[in-house]
Image: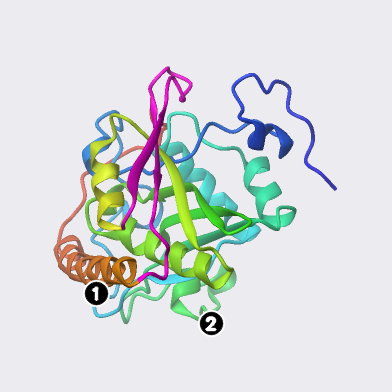
């Protein structure tokens, strides 16, 4: 069953309008350097004490499911000025065969395992650990278009954006994608630098692409399985692992400042 028709599609591209709802243009990656408008530092399980993540392990990538949407909606409000709705995610997760969404969860440290309702032990730590990053792409023929990427506010600048993007590109290649594309704000220098590390290059500009009038940069990769691209991804993976471990060790011993959960302006 197709998603319900939107009330208005004036700001939608043709692809968004045909999907049956109005989304703001992708890509929406939020990085520490580009998040000056966000006043909150963290949400969820990491706001009341030092980080519980097991720094000897790396974040585990798992498919995003409808059962994760409460957590995703909380993060959406923290990360974005105009967050996607539950309906948008539900439609992509349950009705859109072109969509693939992934979440990164960091296993909790030994002795700090979270439990499910009724104090029943969690079967797998990663399934109970908080989501620290999430994102998705739409596969159109052989092109994987990055739709959204977000990082938990407290973990920005730690390499999670690269880690998740690498997982998305791996999933895209497994589904037959030969290239990847995205749109990014012209002023989002931090995101552009990260995309450059992942092999994306400027391919064009869409004037006044975003709802506030900012231009959008169209970026694309070379063939994903080309030797040059694979070498870039290998280097990006090594950098992400180093940054993740260093950042986790630091955050594990740092008491976060008190915060209140509220939407970003």
**Helix or strand or loop: what does disc 2 sit on?**
loop
At 43% across and 49% down in the image, what residue appears? 149
The residue carrying pointer 2 sits among few (fewer than 14), some (14 to 19) or many (20 or more) residues within 10 Å by Cα, namely: few
Please give the label number shown on residue 55.
Answer: 1
At 71% across and 40% down in the image, what residue appears? 19
Mark 1 or 2: the one toward you? 1
What secondary structure do most residues of the magenta stretch adopt? loop
Residue 178: x and y, percent? 50, 63
For label 2, the residue is: 123
Q: Which mark sits nearer the N-terminus, 1 or 2? A: 1
Above or below 253: residue 208:
above
State the image quarter where residue 175 is shown.
bottom right
State the image quarter where residue 219 is shown.
top left
Q: Nearer the viewer, residue 73 or 12?
A: 12
Above or below 75: residue 59:
below
The residue carrying pointer 1 sits among few (fewer than 14), some (14 to 19) or many (20 or more) residues within 10 Å by Cα, namely: many
Q: CA distance from mark 1 to mark 2?
A: 20 Å
Residue 114: x and y, percent? 44, 71
At 38% across and 21% down in the image, what residue appears? 214
167 with respect to 123 (left or right):
left
73 with respect to 88 (left or right):
left
48 with respect to 180 (left or right):
left
Q: Nearer the viewer, residue 177 or 83?
A: 177
Above or below 151: residue 171:
below
Residue 95: x and y, percent? 75, 53
**Helix or strand or loop: what does disc 1 sit on?**
loop
Residue 17: x and y, percent? 69, 32
Q: Which residues are magenta?
A: 199-226
């Amino acid at each position: 069953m197709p998603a319900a028709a939107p009330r208005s599609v004036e700001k939608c591209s043709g692809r968004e309008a045909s999907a049956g709802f109005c989304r703001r243009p992708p890509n929406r990656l939020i990085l520490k350097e580009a998040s000056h408008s966000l006043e909150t530092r963290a949400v969820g399980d990491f706001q009341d004490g030092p980080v519980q993540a097991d720094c000897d392990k790396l974040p585990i990538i798992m498919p995003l499911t409808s059962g994760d949407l409460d957590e995703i909606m909380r993060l959406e409000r923290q990360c974005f000025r105009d967050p996607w709705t539950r309906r948008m995610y539900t439609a992509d997760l349950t009705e859109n065969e072109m969509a693939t969404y992934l979440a990164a969860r960091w296993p909790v440290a030994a002795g700090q395992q979270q439990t499910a309702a009724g104090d029943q032990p969690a079967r797998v730590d990663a399934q109970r650990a908080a989501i620290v990053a999430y994102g998705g792409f739409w596969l159109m023929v052989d092109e994987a278009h990055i739709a959204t990427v977000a990082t938990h506010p407290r973990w920005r600048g730690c390499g999670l954006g690269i880690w998740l993007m690498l997982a998305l590109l791996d999933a895209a290649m497994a589904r037959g994608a030969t290239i990847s594309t995205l749109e990014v704000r012209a002023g989002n220098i931090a995101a552009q630098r990260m995309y450059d590390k992942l092999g994306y290059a400027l391919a064009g500009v869409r004037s006044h692409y975003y709802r506030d009038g900012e231009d959008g940069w169209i970026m694309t990769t070379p063939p994903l399985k080309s030797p040059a691209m694979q070498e870039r991804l290998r280097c990006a993976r090594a950098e992400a692992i180093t940054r993740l471990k260093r950042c986790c060790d630091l955050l594990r011993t740092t008491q976060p400042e008190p915060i209140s959960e509220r939407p970003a302006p």
